[in-house]
């Protein structure tokens, strides 16, 4: 069943676990992620970036693929269909109109006031349609440059969440997209302080590659949604590459693509276990 994230976040906050958000990068991944989470009895957020929407062919194609898979595969868990890192109001509107149940507006590259204005526009459009809105302040993609890690400002975070009325907030606490070099400097103290001040569920982007201890600490400090993409990509692609290298005579795309299925599902089972969403239904 497609749902918005509100109820899922409420239960997760109450019980001290997080909802996993996995990016769907193609049709096969939708099935793998739904099956793995259904087996784990874990609620799940299926995240789609604007570039993945282009890859699939359009917003409605994504919505219909997800809805049909839920029905045909007899998926019993609640599923959120989420637009990830949308840079403008138009793509949020398109996603909402196509049946997405959650959107992230990422105007973090704009000025503080512009970010508030664009985010508020999305919140106004989404709220009558029961769609959840996530937004970001600071910028994850600038937070990996050597010693100049980026951290969201506490007072600005408070102001931003209050003035926009968003449902969940993605602060930057030294987290980055992609792979960490092993020397990540997450500021959990800041995370805890933001959690106390903003009073909405917090989202951890760039959770790929964080060890069990760091993930659990982040959840303890108030994180309710954990975003994982790179780790799935690495697990899936390394298995597919290995399969192609060992089976040079195979040309059936179904065999090649599905050779990464087990590796991808294994990462999902492992993450659901760590963040505590397993067996929560
Ligand atoms: Zn992100």
Image: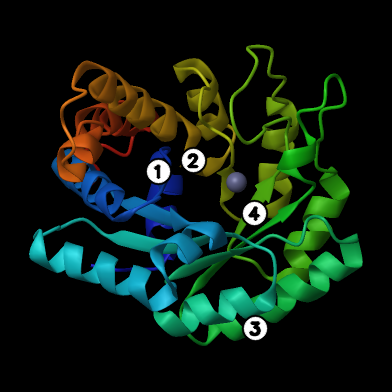
- Which is in the foreground here, disc 4 or disc 1? 1
Rendering coords of residue 62 (x, y %): 36, 68
Measure the C-alpha gap from mark 2 to mark 3: 25 Å
Rendering coords of residue 88 (x, y %): 70, 71
The answer as to whether callout 2 falls within 8 Å of ligand 1 is no
In the displayed structure, would residue 238 be above or below residue 264? above
- Sequence-first disc among 3 and 4: 3
Residue beneath the point at 8% across and 60% down:
74
Residue under pointer 1: 20
Q: Is residue 5 visible?
A: no
Q: Are marks 3 and 4 in contact (CB under 8 Å)?
A: no
Measure the C-alpha gap from mark 2 to mark 1: 5 Å
Measure the C-alpha gap from mark 1 to mark 3: 26 Å
Q: Are marks 2 and 1 in contact (CB under 8 Å)?
A: yes
- Sequence-first disc among 4 and 1: 1
Describe residue 263's horizontal placement relative to residue 250 as left or right: right
Residue under pointer 3: 124
**Residue in the foreground of this view, choosing between 251 and 14:** 251
- Sequence-first disc among 1 and 3: 1
Residue under pointer 2: 226
């Amino acid at each position: 069943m497609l749902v918005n994230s509100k109820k899922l976040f409420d239960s997760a906050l109450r019980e001290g676990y997080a909802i996993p958000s996995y990016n769907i990068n193609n049709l096969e991944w939708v099935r793998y992620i739904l099956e793995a989470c259904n087996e784990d009895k874990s609620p799940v957020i299926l995240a789609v970036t604007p570039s993945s929407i282009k890859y699939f062919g359009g917003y409605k194609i994504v919505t219909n693929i997800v809805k049909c898979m839920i029905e045909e595969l007899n998926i019993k868990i609640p599923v959120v269909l989420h637009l990830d890192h949308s840079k403008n109001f138009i793509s949020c509107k398109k996603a909402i109109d196509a049946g997405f149940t959650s959107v992230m507006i990422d105007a973090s590259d704009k000025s503080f006031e512009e970010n508030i204005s664009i985010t508020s526009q999305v919140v106004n459009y989404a709220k009558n349609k029961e769609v959840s809105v996530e937004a970001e302040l600071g910028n994850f993609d600038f937070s990996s440059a050597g010693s100049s890690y980026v951290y969201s400002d506490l007072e600005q975070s408070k102001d931003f969440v209050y003035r926009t009325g968003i449902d969940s907030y993605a602060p930057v606490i030294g987290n980055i997209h992609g792979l960490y070099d092993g020397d990540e400097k997450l500021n959990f103290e800041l995370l805890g302080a933001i959690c106390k001040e903003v009073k909405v569920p917090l989202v951890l982007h760039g959770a790929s590659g964080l060890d069990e201890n760091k993930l659990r600490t982040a959840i303890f400090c108030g994180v309710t949604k954990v975003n994982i993409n790179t780790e799935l990509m690495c697990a899936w692609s390394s298995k597919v590459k290995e399969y192609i290298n060992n089976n040079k005579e195979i040309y059936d795309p179904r065999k090649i693509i599905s050779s990464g299925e087990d590796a991808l599902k294994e990462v999902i089972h492992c993450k659901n276990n760590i963040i505590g969403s397993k067996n929560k239904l």
